[in-house]
Amino acid sequence: MRIDNFDGSGQKGSEDNTAYIKRGDNTRSKRGFNGNSQVNGHRSDGSRRHSNRDSGQNDLPKGYSHDNAPRKTRPKLQPGEYIDKYGRVRQHSEAYLRRVRQVKIRLTIIGIAALLFIILIGFLIWNLFFKGNDEAEKSLANQEEPAVSFEDDSIIQIKSTSSNEASTEASQETQETQESSDPAVPGFFAGYNVYPTEETVYISNPEVNSNYAVLVDLTDGHIVGQKNADTVISPASMTKIMTVLVAAEHISEDDLDNTVTMTREIADFVYQNESSAVNYAVDEVIPVRDLFFGTILPSGGDAALALANYVAGSEEAFVTMMNEKAEELGISSTAHFANPIGLYSEENHCTVTDMAIILKAAMENPISREALSTKRFTTTPTEQHPEGIDISNWFLRRIEDKDTHGEVLGAKTGFVVQSGNCAASCSLSGDGKYYICVTGQAHSAWRCIYDHVAIYQDYLTASPEDETAEDGSTTGSDVSGNSSSAE
Protein backbone atom coordinates (compact mmCIF):
# COMPACT_ATOMS: atom_id res chain seq x y z
CA MET A 1 0.00 0.00 0.00
CA ARG A 2 1.43 3.37 -1.01
CA ILE A 3 1.48 6.40 1.32
CA ASP A 4 2.90 9.89 0.91
CA ASN A 5 5.94 10.78 2.94
CA PHE A 6 6.27 14.07 4.82
CA ASP A 7 9.47 15.62 5.90
CA GLY A 8 10.10 16.92 9.33
CA SER A 9 8.60 20.31 8.51
CA GLY A 10 5.22 18.81 7.79
CA GLN A 11 5.40 19.37 4.05
CA LYS A 12 4.52 16.69 1.60
CA GLY A 13 7.65 15.12 0.24
CA SER A 14 8.44 14.24 -3.34
CA GLU A 15 7.38 11.04 -5.05
CA ASP A 16 10.91 9.75 -4.72
CA ASN A 17 10.44 9.79 -0.99
CA THR A 18 7.54 7.34 -1.13
CA ALA A 19 7.57 4.77 1.72
CA TYR A 20 5.89 1.36 1.87
CA ILE A 21 4.18 -0.48 4.65
CA LYS A 22 4.30 -4.30 4.98
CA ARG A 23 0.90 -5.91 4.13
CA GLY A 24 -0.93 -7.36 7.08
CA ASP A 25 0.42 -5.16 9.90
CA ASN A 26 1.18 -1.53 10.73
CA THR A 27 4.99 -1.75 11.00
CA ARG A 28 7.03 0.34 8.68
CA SER A 29 9.45 -1.21 6.21
CA LYS A 30 13.19 -1.14 6.70
CA ARG A 31 13.13 1.99 4.58
CA GLY A 32 10.38 3.55 6.64
CA PHE A 33 10.67 7.22 7.19
CA ASN A 34 12.03 8.37 10.54
CA GLY A 35 12.78 11.96 9.67
CA ASN A 36 15.64 10.76 7.49
CA SER A 37 13.81 8.41 5.20
CA GLN A 38 15.72 6.83 2.36
CA VAL A 39 14.64 5.74 -1.06
CA ASN A 40 16.83 3.91 -3.51
CA GLY A 41 19.92 4.40 -1.38
CA HIS A 42 19.57 8.22 -0.92
CA ARG A 43 19.14 9.98 2.38
CA SER A 44 16.61 12.77 2.78
CA ASP A 45 19.43 15.30 2.97
CA GLY A 46 20.56 14.35 -0.51
CA SER A 47 23.60 12.34 0.49
CA ARG A 48 23.96 8.80 -0.77
CA ARG A 49 24.70 5.78 1.36
CA HIS A 50 26.03 2.49 0.11
CA SER A 51 23.39 -0.16 -0.43
CA ASN A 52 23.55 -3.24 1.65
CA ARG A 53 24.45 -5.41 -1.32
CA ASP A 54 27.05 -2.92 -2.62
CA SER A 55 28.77 -2.60 0.71
CA GLY A 56 28.74 -6.28 1.41
CA GLN A 57 26.73 -5.61 4.53
CA ASN A 58 23.10 -6.39 5.24
CA ASP A 59 20.48 -6.16 7.86
CA LEU A 60 20.06 -10.05 8.13
CA PRO A 61 20.66 -11.75 11.43
CA LYS A 62 24.23 -12.38 12.37
CA GLY A 63 25.77 -15.28 10.50
CA TYR A 64 23.36 -15.10 7.51
CA SER A 65 23.80 -13.75 4.02
CA HIS A 66 21.45 -13.37 1.07
CA ASP A 67 22.46 -16.84 -0.12
CA ASN A 68 21.64 -18.69 3.09
CA ALA A 69 18.96 -16.51 4.56
CA PRO A 70 16.23 -18.42 6.46
CA ARG A 71 13.08 -18.91 4.42
CA LYS A 72 9.53 -19.01 5.60
CA THR A 73 8.38 -22.69 5.51
CA ARG A 74 4.87 -24.17 5.24
CA PRO A 75 3.68 -25.23 8.67
CA LYS A 76 3.10 -28.96 9.25
CA LEU A 77 -0.62 -29.59 9.21
CA GLN A 78 -2.43 -31.99 11.48
CA PRO A 79 -5.34 -34.15 10.21
CA GLY A 80 -8.33 -31.95 9.52
CA GLU A 81 -6.32 -28.71 9.24
CA TYR A 82 -5.82 -26.49 6.19
CA ILE A 83 -4.27 -23.12 5.32
CA ASP A 84 -6.63 -20.37 4.23
CA LYS A 85 -5.86 -17.72 1.63
CA TYR A 86 -4.30 -15.48 4.27
CA GLY A 87 -1.82 -18.13 5.28
CA ARG A 88 -3.55 -18.95 8.54
CA VAL A 89 -4.00 -22.52 9.77
CA ARG A 90 -7.64 -23.44 10.07
CA GLN A 91 -9.56 -26.51 11.27
CA HIS A 92 -12.17 -28.19 9.01
CA SER A 93 -15.64 -28.57 10.49
CA GLU A 94 -16.73 -32.02 11.67
CA ALA A 95 -19.52 -32.09 9.06
CA TYR A 96 -16.97 -31.49 6.28
CA LEU A 97 -14.66 -34.23 7.57
CA ARG A 98 -17.60 -36.62 7.79
CA ARG A 99 -18.52 -35.95 4.17
CA VAL A 100 -14.93 -36.54 3.10
CA ARG A 101 -14.87 -39.88 4.90
CA GLN A 102 -18.14 -40.89 3.27
CA VAL A 103 -16.82 -40.02 -0.18
CA LYS A 104 -13.64 -42.03 0.45
CA ILE A 105 -15.64 -45.06 1.59
CA ARG A 106 -17.92 -44.86 -1.45
CA LEU A 107 -15.00 -44.55 -3.85
CA THR A 108 -13.30 -47.54 -2.19
CA ILE A 109 -16.43 -49.67 -2.49
CA ILE A 110 -16.91 -48.64 -6.12
CA GLY A 111 -13.29 -49.48 -6.88
CA ILE A 112 -13.50 -52.91 -5.27
CA ALA A 113 -16.79 -53.67 -7.06
CA ALA A 114 -15.31 -52.59 -10.39
CA LEU A 115 -12.26 -54.78 -9.82
CA LEU A 116 -14.38 -57.80 -8.93
CA PHE A 117 -16.59 -57.20 -11.97
CA ILE A 118 -13.55 -57.06 -14.26
CA ILE A 119 -12.19 -60.28 -12.74
CA LEU A 120 -15.56 -61.98 -13.19
CA ILE A 121 -15.87 -60.89 -16.82
CA GLY A 122 -12.34 -62.06 -17.49
CA PHE A 123 -13.01 -65.44 -15.91
CA LEU A 124 -16.20 -65.93 -17.94
CA ILE A 125 -14.45 -64.99 -21.17
CA TRP A 126 -11.57 -67.34 -20.42
CA ASN A 127 -13.90 -70.15 -19.43
CA LEU A 128 -16.10 -69.66 -22.49
CA PHE A 129 -13.53 -69.17 -25.22
CA PHE A 130 -10.16 -70.44 -24.06
CA LYS A 131 -10.52 -73.18 -21.45
CA GLY A 132 -12.36 -75.61 -23.72
CA ASN A 133 -9.90 -75.00 -26.56
CA ASP A 134 -6.86 -75.52 -24.35
CA GLU A 135 -8.18 -78.80 -22.94
CA ALA A 136 -9.14 -80.09 -26.37
CA GLU A 137 -5.74 -79.23 -27.87
CA LYS A 138 -3.93 -80.75 -24.89
CA SER A 139 -5.94 -83.95 -25.15
CA LEU A 140 -5.45 -84.22 -28.91
CA ALA A 141 -1.73 -83.60 -28.51
CA ASN A 142 -1.46 -86.43 -26.00
CA GLN A 143 -3.23 -88.90 -28.24
CA GLU A 144 -1.14 -91.03 -30.60
CA GLU A 145 -3.59 -92.59 -32.99
CA PRO A 146 -5.64 -93.67 -29.93
CA ALA A 147 -7.63 -96.81 -29.82
CA VAL A 148 -10.20 -97.46 -27.11
CA SER A 149 -10.55 -100.59 -25.04
CA PHE A 150 -13.55 -101.71 -23.04
CA GLU A 151 -13.28 -102.88 -19.46
CA ASP A 152 -15.96 -104.84 -17.57
CA ASP A 153 -16.77 -101.83 -15.36
CA SER A 154 -17.87 -99.77 -18.38
CA ILE A 155 -15.06 -97.24 -18.09
CA ILE A 156 -13.36 -95.96 -21.22
CA GLN A 157 -9.56 -95.98 -21.13
CA ILE A 158 -7.48 -94.44 -23.89
CA LYS A 159 -4.49 -96.56 -24.89
CA SER A 160 -1.80 -96.38 -27.55
CA THR A 161 -2.11 -98.04 -30.95
CA SER A 162 -0.30 -101.12 -29.68
CA SER A 163 -3.60 -102.26 -28.05
CA ASN A 164 -5.77 -101.87 -31.18
CA GLU A 165 -6.14 -105.56 -31.82
CA ALA A 166 -7.20 -106.47 -28.25
CA SER A 167 -9.65 -103.56 -28.18
CA THR A 168 -11.28 -104.62 -31.46
CA GLU A 169 -11.74 -108.21 -30.26
CA ALA A 170 -13.36 -107.09 -26.99
CA SER A 171 -15.72 -104.76 -28.86
CA GLN A 172 -16.77 -107.50 -31.28
CA GLU A 173 -17.47 -109.96 -28.44
CA THR A 174 -19.59 -107.40 -26.58
CA GLN A 175 -21.56 -106.54 -29.72
CA GLU A 176 -22.23 -110.22 -30.53
CA THR A 177 -23.48 -110.86 -26.98
CA GLN A 178 -25.89 -107.92 -27.13
CA GLU A 179 -27.25 -108.84 -30.56
CA SER A 180 -28.04 -112.36 -29.35
CA SER A 181 -30.65 -111.00 -26.89
CA ASP A 182 -33.94 -109.29 -27.63
CA PRO A 183 -33.88 -105.55 -26.84
CA ALA A 184 -36.33 -104.24 -24.25
CA VAL A 185 -37.38 -101.45 -26.62
CA PRO A 186 -37.31 -101.53 -30.45
CA GLY A 187 -34.32 -99.52 -31.58
CA PHE A 188 -32.39 -100.05 -28.34
CA PHE A 189 -29.59 -102.59 -28.04
CA ALA A 190 -30.07 -105.38 -25.49
CA GLY A 191 -28.18 -105.17 -22.21
CA TYR A 192 -26.26 -102.32 -20.62
CA ASN A 193 -22.68 -102.70 -21.83
CA VAL A 194 -21.48 -99.76 -23.87
CA TYR A 195 -18.18 -100.07 -25.67
CA PRO A 196 -15.83 -97.94 -27.73
CA THR A 197 -14.54 -98.81 -31.16
CA GLU A 198 -11.64 -97.72 -33.31
CA GLU A 199 -13.96 -95.05 -34.71
CA THR A 200 -14.73 -93.57 -31.29
CA VAL A 201 -13.56 -89.95 -31.37
CA TYR A 202 -12.60 -87.37 -28.82
CA ILE A 203 -15.21 -84.59 -28.65
CA SER A 204 -12.94 -81.67 -29.51
CA ASN A 205 -15.50 -79.15 -30.76
CA PRO A 206 -14.57 -75.85 -29.04
CA GLU A 207 -18.28 -75.01 -28.83
CA VAL A 208 -18.69 -77.85 -26.31
CA ASN A 209 -17.91 -76.16 -23.03
CA SER A 210 -18.58 -79.16 -20.78
CA ASN A 211 -15.45 -80.86 -19.47
CA TYR A 212 -17.10 -84.30 -19.48
CA ALA A 213 -19.23 -85.76 -22.29
CA VAL A 214 -20.22 -89.02 -23.93
CA LEU A 215 -22.46 -89.90 -26.87
CA VAL A 216 -23.76 -93.48 -27.12
CA ASP A 217 -25.41 -95.04 -30.16
CA LEU A 218 -28.29 -97.13 -28.78
CA THR A 219 -28.47 -99.22 -31.94
CA ASP A 220 -25.58 -101.41 -30.79
CA GLY A 221 -24.19 -99.66 -27.70
CA HIS A 222 -20.95 -98.31 -29.18
CA ILE A 223 -19.58 -94.97 -28.05
CA VAL A 224 -19.57 -92.44 -30.85
CA GLY A 225 -17.63 -89.72 -29.03
CA GLN A 226 -16.30 -89.01 -25.56
CA LYS A 227 -14.54 -86.37 -23.53
CA ASN A 228 -13.09 -87.39 -20.17
CA ALA A 229 -15.88 -89.96 -19.99
CA ASP A 230 -14.04 -92.12 -17.45
CA THR A 231 -13.76 -89.35 -14.84
CA VAL A 232 -15.88 -89.80 -11.72
CA ILE A 233 -18.02 -86.72 -11.01
CA SER A 234 -20.96 -85.72 -8.85
CA PRO A 235 -24.11 -86.34 -10.94
CA ALA A 236 -26.14 -83.74 -9.01
CA SER A 237 -29.85 -83.98 -9.84
CA MET A 238 -29.21 -86.43 -12.67
CA THR A 239 -29.32 -88.80 -9.69
CA LYS A 240 -33.10 -88.50 -9.88
CA ILE A 241 -33.03 -90.55 -13.09
CA MET A 242 -31.94 -93.50 -10.95
CA THR A 243 -34.57 -92.51 -8.35
CA VAL A 244 -37.52 -92.75 -10.76
CA LEU A 245 -36.05 -95.89 -12.35
CA VAL A 246 -35.80 -97.77 -9.04
CA ALA A 247 -39.22 -96.52 -7.92
CA ALA A 248 -40.84 -97.50 -11.22
CA GLU A 249 -39.41 -101.02 -11.02
CA HIS A 250 -40.85 -101.58 -7.54
CA ILE A 251 -44.44 -100.47 -8.12
CA SER A 252 -47.22 -101.41 -10.52
CA GLU A 253 -49.51 -99.29 -12.66
CA ASP A 254 -52.24 -99.66 -10.02
CA ASP A 255 -49.95 -98.15 -7.37
CA LEU A 256 -49.76 -94.87 -9.30
CA ASP A 257 -53.22 -93.89 -8.05
CA ASN A 258 -52.26 -94.37 -4.40
CA THR A 259 -51.54 -91.25 -2.37
CA VAL A 260 -48.71 -90.03 -0.17
CA THR A 261 -48.92 -87.34 2.52
CA MET A 262 -46.17 -84.73 2.54
CA THR A 263 -44.49 -84.61 5.94
CA ARG A 264 -42.91 -81.81 7.90
CA GLU A 265 -39.61 -83.72 8.01
CA ILE A 266 -39.35 -83.84 4.21
CA ALA A 267 -40.31 -80.18 3.79
CA ASP A 268 -37.76 -79.06 6.41
CA PHE A 269 -35.00 -81.24 4.95
CA VAL A 270 -35.49 -79.83 1.46
CA TYR A 271 -35.60 -76.27 2.78
CA GLN A 272 -32.50 -76.64 4.96
CA ASN A 273 -30.49 -78.13 2.10
CA GLU A 274 -31.71 -75.50 -0.40
CA SER A 275 -32.90 -78.18 -2.78
CA SER A 276 -35.21 -77.43 -5.68
CA ALA A 277 -38.79 -78.45 -4.94
CA VAL A 278 -42.32 -78.74 -6.29
CA ASN A 279 -43.31 -76.80 -3.18
CA TYR A 280 -45.91 -79.20 -1.85
CA ALA A 281 -47.51 -78.09 1.40
CA VAL A 282 -47.15 -80.01 4.64
CA ASP A 283 -49.98 -82.57 5.01
CA GLU A 284 -50.82 -82.25 1.32
CA VAL A 285 -52.11 -85.57 -0.09
CA ILE A 286 -50.33 -86.35 -3.38
CA PRO A 287 -50.91 -89.17 -5.90
CA VAL A 288 -47.86 -91.37 -6.47
CA ARG A 289 -48.09 -90.66 -10.19
CA ASP A 290 -47.57 -86.95 -9.53
CA LEU A 291 -44.42 -87.70 -7.53
CA PHE A 292 -42.73 -89.11 -10.65
CA PHE A 293 -43.42 -85.92 -12.60
CA GLY A 294 -42.50 -83.77 -9.60
CA THR A 295 -39.15 -85.54 -9.24
CA ILE A 296 -38.12 -85.01 -12.88
CA LEU A 297 -39.76 -81.88 -14.32
CA PRO A 298 -38.94 -79.27 -11.62
CA SER A 299 -36.29 -81.58 -10.07
CA GLY A 300 -38.31 -81.58 -6.87
CA GLY A 301 -36.43 -82.84 -3.85
CA ASP A 302 -39.66 -83.02 -1.87
CA ALA A 303 -41.23 -85.30 -4.50
CA ALA A 304 -38.11 -87.50 -4.69
CA LEU A 305 -37.97 -88.04 -0.93
CA ALA A 306 -41.71 -88.72 -0.71
CA LEU A 307 -41.41 -91.25 -3.54
CA ALA A 308 -38.42 -92.94 -1.89
CA ASN A 309 -40.24 -93.24 1.43
CA TYR A 310 -43.34 -94.63 -0.27
CA VAL A 311 -41.40 -97.31 -2.15
CA ALA A 312 -38.86 -98.39 0.51
CA GLY A 313 -40.21 -97.08 3.79
CA SER A 314 -37.19 -94.87 4.42
CA GLU A 315 -34.56 -92.91 2.53
CA GLU A 316 -31.77 -95.21 3.73
CA ALA A 317 -33.55 -98.34 2.47
CA PHE A 318 -34.21 -96.70 -0.89
CA VAL A 319 -30.54 -95.72 -1.27
CA THR A 320 -29.64 -99.36 -0.74
CA MET A 321 -31.99 -100.26 -3.58
CA MET A 322 -30.34 -97.63 -5.80
CA ASN A 323 -26.89 -99.12 -5.25
CA GLU A 324 -28.22 -102.61 -5.87
CA LYS A 325 -29.54 -101.37 -9.21
CA ALA A 326 -26.14 -99.87 -10.02
CA GLU A 327 -24.55 -103.26 -9.39
CA GLU A 328 -27.18 -104.91 -11.60
CA LEU A 329 -26.33 -102.49 -14.42
CA GLY A 330 -22.63 -103.30 -14.07
CA ILE A 331 -21.50 -99.84 -13.04
CA SER A 332 -20.97 -100.29 -9.30
CA SER A 333 -17.19 -99.92 -9.57
CA THR A 334 -17.55 -96.23 -10.40
CA ALA A 335 -21.19 -95.43 -9.54
CA HIS A 336 -22.47 -95.11 -5.99
CA PHE A 337 -25.41 -93.19 -4.53
CA ALA A 338 -25.87 -91.62 -1.11
CA ASN A 339 -29.29 -89.97 -1.46
CA PRO A 340 -32.22 -89.97 -3.92
CA ILE A 341 -32.04 -86.20 -4.51
CA GLY A 342 -28.51 -85.71 -5.79
CA LEU A 343 -27.20 -83.54 -2.96
CA TYR A 344 -23.44 -83.33 -3.05
CA SER A 345 -21.63 -86.06 -1.16
CA GLU A 346 -18.33 -87.81 -1.69
CA GLU A 347 -20.35 -91.03 -1.68
CA ASN A 348 -22.67 -89.83 -4.45
CA HIS A 349 -20.79 -90.18 -7.73
CA CYS A 350 -20.58 -91.78 -11.17
CA THR A 351 -19.13 -91.15 -14.64
CA VAL A 352 -21.03 -89.69 -17.57
CA THR A 353 -20.86 -93.14 -19.17
CA ASP A 354 -22.54 -94.64 -16.09
CA MET A 355 -25.32 -92.05 -16.32
CA ALA A 356 -25.86 -92.88 -20.00
CA ILE A 357 -26.47 -96.51 -19.00
CA ILE A 358 -28.86 -95.42 -16.23
CA LEU A 359 -30.81 -93.20 -18.63
CA LYS A 360 -31.09 -96.06 -21.13
CA ALA A 361 -32.61 -98.29 -18.43
CA ALA A 362 -34.99 -95.50 -17.38
CA MET A 363 -36.16 -94.92 -20.96
CA GLU A 364 -36.91 -98.62 -21.25
CA ASN A 365 -39.36 -98.49 -18.31
CA PRO A 366 -42.74 -97.00 -19.34
CA ILE A 367 -43.38 -95.27 -15.99
CA SER A 368 -40.03 -93.53 -15.70
CA ARG A 369 -39.96 -92.86 -19.47
CA GLU A 370 -43.25 -90.95 -19.26
CA ALA A 371 -41.83 -88.69 -16.55
CA LEU A 372 -38.57 -88.08 -18.43
CA SER A 373 -40.28 -87.27 -21.75
CA THR A 374 -43.05 -84.94 -20.49
CA LYS A 375 -42.48 -81.21 -21.06
CA ARG A 376 -45.35 -79.77 -19.02
CA PHE A 377 -47.59 -81.16 -16.30
CA THR A 378 -50.20 -79.86 -13.86
CA THR A 379 -50.40 -81.70 -10.56
CA THR A 380 -53.66 -83.10 -9.25
CA PRO A 381 -55.77 -80.41 -7.49
CA THR A 382 -55.66 -80.67 -3.71
CA GLU A 383 -57.02 -78.74 -0.76
CA GLN A 384 -53.78 -76.76 -0.53
CA HIS A 385 -53.54 -76.25 -4.31
CA PRO A 386 -57.08 -76.26 -5.76
CA GLU A 387 -55.81 -75.54 -9.28
CA GLY A 388 -52.80 -77.81 -9.06
CA ILE A 389 -49.18 -76.78 -9.59
CA ASP A 390 -47.86 -76.13 -13.10
CA ILE A 391 -44.43 -77.71 -13.59
CA SER A 392 -42.24 -78.18 -16.68
CA ASN A 393 -39.03 -79.76 -17.92
CA TRP A 394 -36.82 -76.72 -18.53
CA PHE A 395 -34.30 -78.60 -20.70
CA LEU A 396 -36.88 -80.09 -23.06
CA ARG A 397 -38.71 -76.80 -23.48
CA ARG A 398 -35.51 -74.87 -24.28
CA ILE A 399 -34.00 -77.39 -26.69
CA GLU A 400 -37.13 -78.19 -28.70
CA ASP A 401 -36.63 -75.28 -31.10
CA LYS A 402 -32.91 -75.99 -31.65
CA ASP A 403 -31.51 -77.91 -34.61
CA THR A 404 -30.33 -81.21 -33.10
CA HIS A 405 -30.61 -83.22 -36.33
CA GLY A 406 -33.52 -85.02 -34.76
CA GLU A 407 -35.77 -84.79 -31.70
CA VAL A 408 -34.85 -84.90 -28.03
CA LEU A 409 -37.28 -87.31 -26.39
CA GLY A 410 -36.33 -87.19 -22.72
CA ALA A 411 -33.90 -85.37 -20.45
CA LYS A 412 -32.86 -84.48 -16.92
CA THR A 413 -30.55 -81.71 -15.76
CA GLY A 414 -28.54 -81.19 -12.59
CA PHE A 415 -26.32 -78.72 -10.82
CA VAL A 416 -23.95 -78.69 -7.88
CA VAL A 417 -20.98 -76.40 -7.47
CA GLN A 418 -18.54 -79.30 -7.56
CA SER A 419 -19.60 -80.51 -11.03
CA GLY A 420 -21.27 -77.44 -12.52
CA ASN A 421 -24.25 -77.79 -14.83
CA CYS A 422 -24.84 -81.26 -16.22
CA ALA A 423 -27.53 -83.00 -18.26
CA ALA A 424 -28.51 -86.34 -19.77
CA SER A 425 -30.76 -86.60 -22.82
CA CYS A 426 -32.08 -89.22 -25.22
CA SER A 427 -32.57 -88.27 -28.87
CA LEU A 428 -34.01 -89.76 -32.04
CA SER A 429 -31.93 -88.75 -35.06
CA GLY A 430 -33.23 -87.92 -38.51
CA ASP A 431 -32.26 -91.35 -39.83
CA GLY A 432 -34.25 -93.15 -37.10
CA LYS A 433 -31.45 -94.05 -34.68
CA TYR A 434 -31.54 -93.48 -30.91
CA TYR A 435 -28.70 -91.79 -29.03
CA ILE A 436 -27.95 -90.83 -25.44
CA CYS A 437 -25.80 -87.81 -24.63
CA VAL A 438 -24.52 -86.96 -21.14
CA THR A 439 -22.45 -83.89 -20.28
CA GLY A 440 -20.98 -82.47 -17.09
CA GLN A 441 -19.38 -79.30 -15.74
CA ALA A 442 -20.70 -76.64 -18.08
CA HIS A 443 -20.53 -73.09 -16.73
CA SER A 444 -24.25 -72.37 -17.14
CA ALA A 445 -27.59 -74.10 -17.71
CA TRP A 446 -27.91 -72.55 -21.17
CA ARG A 447 -24.35 -73.59 -22.08
CA CYS A 448 -25.27 -77.13 -21.08
CA ILE A 449 -28.15 -77.10 -23.59
CA TYR A 450 -25.95 -75.72 -26.36
CA ASP A 451 -23.37 -78.42 -25.65
CA HIS A 452 -25.98 -81.10 -26.35
CA VAL A 453 -27.04 -79.26 -29.50
CA ALA A 454 -23.44 -79.06 -30.72
CA ILE A 455 -22.76 -82.74 -30.04
CA TYR A 456 -25.96 -83.86 -31.77
CA GLN A 457 -25.21 -81.65 -34.77
CA ASP A 458 -21.69 -83.07 -35.08
CA TYR A 459 -22.56 -86.76 -34.96
CA LEU A 460 -26.26 -87.30 -35.76
CA THR A 461 -27.66 -87.57 -39.26
CA ALA A 462 -30.39 -85.09 -40.12
CA SER A 463 -33.53 -86.03 -42.05
CA PRO A 464 -33.26 -85.59 -45.82
CA GLU A 465 -35.07 -82.50 -47.04
CA ASP A 466 -37.20 -84.45 -49.50
CA GLU A 467 -38.49 -86.73 -46.71
CA THR A 468 -39.40 -83.72 -44.59
CA ALA A 469 -41.32 -82.21 -47.49
CA GLU A 470 -43.21 -85.46 -48.14
CA ASP A 471 -44.12 -85.95 -44.51
CA GLY A 472 -45.28 -82.36 -44.14
CA SER A 473 -44.22 -82.35 -40.47
CA THR A 474 -41.28 -83.14 -38.23
CA THR A 475 -43.18 -84.92 -35.51
CA GLY A 476 -41.11 -87.81 -34.19
CA SER A 477 -42.09 -90.85 -32.24
CA ASP A 478 -41.15 -91.89 -28.75
CA VAL A 479 -39.31 -95.08 -27.86
CA SER A 480 -42.57 -96.98 -27.39
CA GLY A 481 -43.51 -96.38 -31.04
CA ASN A 482 -46.31 -93.91 -30.29
CA SER A 483 -46.49 -90.30 -31.35
CA SER A 484 -44.62 -88.18 -28.83
CA SER A 485 -46.63 -85.91 -26.56
CA ALA A 486 -45.10 -82.50 -25.96
CA GLU A 487 -47.72 -81.10 -23.66
Image (cartoon, rainbow, N blue to C red):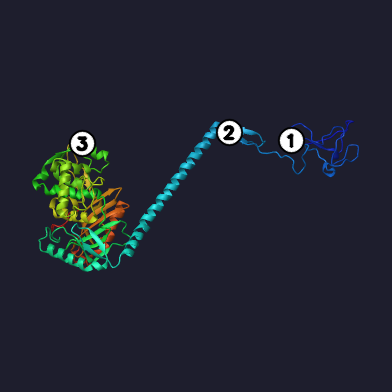
Report the Cα–Cα distance between label 2 and label 1: 26 Å
If you read the primary sequence from the N terminus, does the residue marked by circle 1 or circle 3 appear first? 1
Report the Cα–Cα distance between label 3 and label 2: 62 Å
Q: How many marks?
A: 3
The amino acid type found where label 3 is placed reads Glu
Element carrying mark 1: loop
Report the Cα–Cα distance between label 1 and label 3: 88 Å
The amino acid type found where label 1 is placed reads Arg
For label 1, the residue is 23
Image location (x, y in percent) of residue 39: 84, 39
Image location (x, y in percent) of residue 95: 54, 32
For label 3, the residue is 265
Element carrying mark 3: helix
Element carrying mark 2: loop
Q: Residue at x 15, y 49 (%)?
A: 324
For label 2, the residue is 92
